Amino acid sequence: MKAPAKAAPKDGARAEAKPGTRERIVRATSRLLQRQGYEGTGIKQISREAEATLGSVYHFFPGGKQELAAEAIRHGDEEFAVMLHAGLGSSPDLGEAMTACTRLLATELRASDWQDGCPITSTALETIGRVPVIEEAVAEAFAHWRAVVTERLLAAGIGEQDARELAGTVISTLEGAELAAQVARSEEPLLVTGKHLARLLTAYADDRA
């Protein structure tokens, strides 16, 4: 259903409102964690990047850096899920949808000058076994992404067990391809991965036809 049109902004207000302080803090944290990792990112830098005071940061996140990092991971989770939905929903043909997904990832990665890969990997690796609240957010993110892919595979007629296992393969493969693309500063690892994942998924879908 198409959303109802919004009333025109008054008094010269912008059509799109500037993000609120909390949202700016979360976005800045997500971006910094992607590029610098958990240990390399400090609260003071986050406040500067978000154009927010330290008091504001602690007002919204009294649990400090751990709480903020967990929320930033949830933000990255949603961003990546939106991209997955966009790519996988772009075509009724499963193979074409899979390659569209990797093209989207490649385009976004190139636009960030190869800096913004997976939104949670660096933080996850640096905090394994040490920060339960972050581990939980990371586990939820991966489960969410697998669920998005599983839903698309089920819609293509692939059986439930195969769909769940293939979804895990897709997410793991995309993670590795993103890292390879960053290191090579090239879209090729993602585009090649998309081509072969498309063949794999199409083969399973054809077997069920």
Image (cartoon, rainbow, N blue to C red):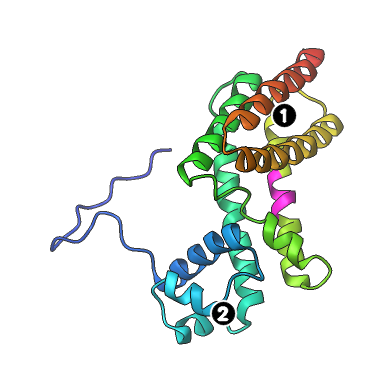
* Residue 51 place in picture, x, y as percent: 38, 73
User: Which residue occupies the extreme bottom position in the image?
Assistant: 55
**Residues under numbered marks 2 and 1 in contact, where contact means CB atoms less than 8 Å apart:** no
Residue 123 image-quadrant placement? bottom right
* Closest to the observer, 44 or 5: 44
Few, some or many residues within 10 Å of mark 1 (<14, 14–19, 20+): many
Pinpoint residue 111: horizontal percent, then vertical percent.
46, 42
State the image quarter where residue 100 is shown: top right
Q: Is residue 49 above or below residue 150?
A: below
Q: Mark 2, residues whose alpha carbon is within 10 Å: few (<14), some, or many (≥20)?
A: some
What residue is drawn where x is 49% and y is 62%? 27
Q: Main secondary structure of the magenta part?
A: helix
Task: Kindly state the secondary structure of the residue where label 1 is placed.
Answer: helix
Q: Which residue is drawn at 37% across and 44% down?
A: 3
Does residue 13 appear in the picture of this structure?
yes
Marking on residue 153: 1
Which of discs 2 and 1 lies nearer the camera? The answer is 2
x and y percentages locating residue 37 in the rendered image: 64, 63
Camera-nearest residue between 51 and 150: 51
- Amino acid type of the residue that numbered disc 2 sits on in the rendered structure: Phe
Residue that lies at the very extreme toward the front in this rendered image: 184
Does residue 176 belong to the magenta stretch? no
Q: Give the range drawn in magenta.
A: 141-145
Q: Name which residue lies at 46% across and 87% down.
A: 55
Per the model, the C-alpha gap separating discs 2 and 1 is 38 Å
Label 2 secondary element: loop
What residue type is disc 1 on? Leu
Q: Mark 2 points at which residue?
A: 61
Query: Left or right: 176 with respect to 31?
Result: right
